[in-house]
Image (tube, helix red, strand yellow):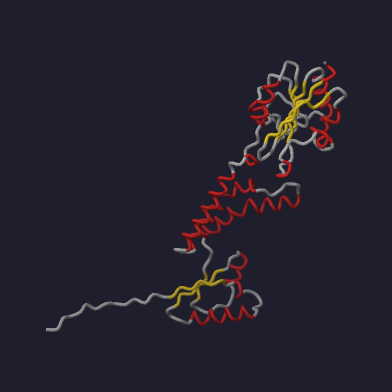
Amino acid sequence: MSERRPLTRTRRRALRVLLDGTPLLGARTGIGRYTAALTEELASMSDVDIRAVAFTLRGWRRLRRSRMRAGAALRQIPPRIVLVALLALATPVGEAIYSVFGTNLLGARNLNASWPGLALAIGGIVTAAGAPLSLLCGALVLSGFAVAGVKTLDSDLARTDYAGAAALIEDRWKPGDVVVDAAPLTPVPLTGLDVYLPQTRPEFRPGLPVSEHPFMVGDPVPPVNRVIGHAIASGRGHAIFLVTHVSSDALSNQVPRTAALRRESQSNAGRLLRRLPSGFAVAERKYLPGVAPLAVFVIRDRSAG
């Protein structure tokens, strides 16, 4: 008696083809005619599942009206991919457009709002490569993040050292001394120095509004020259602690000379140094590195003896 073998059914899997339908739009060039012929031939095969996609909204609409033979399905970009792309591109594109019409600079910190979309896009692109290439790409991406994470520990990338400026002022301050905060990064009355330096001594903030209530748009801003004049008058016979921002250029990793800072016409620190009467002299300078470096000048009135 012969042994009966079980019947096996072989299922042939259809070949799936996804192509960019953009060359099929508008007036067809050589590559467009070739793509159209290829699409028609593939669509005529029963064992081929062919889909066309356009990667822009305008292209998708025109692709739907294009003459493609039956059997070639039109595939729309998944909404999830569109959402990730919009999240990743919204901030840099908007920032670039705004920079064209203003003085704002496009910097890496401005990408924070788009970071969730960028992270998803990076993950999607890496995994789309398939193993083992995706493993190699993932390792390279993680290595890049590791190197960047270590570099953030460098002193020139640290947070602005307002704590160091406050410590220097408190260590050398004597009754009657005044503080001039010419290093604000904000248009509101409160500054980064206020976080670390108690407001128990005379302090002047040229260029910032003055109000007893929380900051509101339209609060009066005293004239800078008047504020600087009051600071110099209050420092007569004592010391003036001047806190200011300096260039973050890697080649200028030191506190600027007084003469160089005095020549900066648009700097409030330069305005104060130019108005110093005879008898005042810079007794000490200190550079505080960081992503926005600071310099502290200790200016003493020598005429007071």
Q: Which residue is painted at 82% across and 21% down in the image?
A: 301
The residue lying toward the viewer, choosing from 28 and 297, is 297
Q: Which residue is painted at 59% across and 55% down in the image?
A: 86
Q: Please indicate whether residue 108 sits to the left or right of residue 208 in the image.
A: left
Q: Measured from the top left, where is residue 215 in percent x and y?
A: 69, 30
Which corner quadrant of the image does residue 165 belong to? top right
Considering every residue shown, the one lying at the far right of the view is 278
Position of residue 77 relative to residue 12, above or below, is above
Q: Please indicate whether residue 46 sits to the left or right of residue 163 in the image.
A: left
Which corner quadrant of the image does residue 229 belong to? top right
The residue lying toward the viewer, choosing from 158 and 39, is 158
Q: Which residue is painted at 82% across and 19% down in the image?
A: 236
Position of residue 4 relative to residue 56, above or below, is below
Position of residue 304 relative to residue 78, above or below, is above
Q: Please indicate whether residue 272 sits to the left or right of residue 31 in the image.
A: right
Q: Measured from the top left, where is residue 295 in percent x and y?
A: 72, 33
Look at the image and tell me in which quarter the N terminus lies.
bottom left
Q: Measured from the top left, where is residue 61 in percent x and y?
A: 60, 68
Circle count: 0
Q: Measured from the top left, where is residue 7 in percent x and y?
A: 24, 78
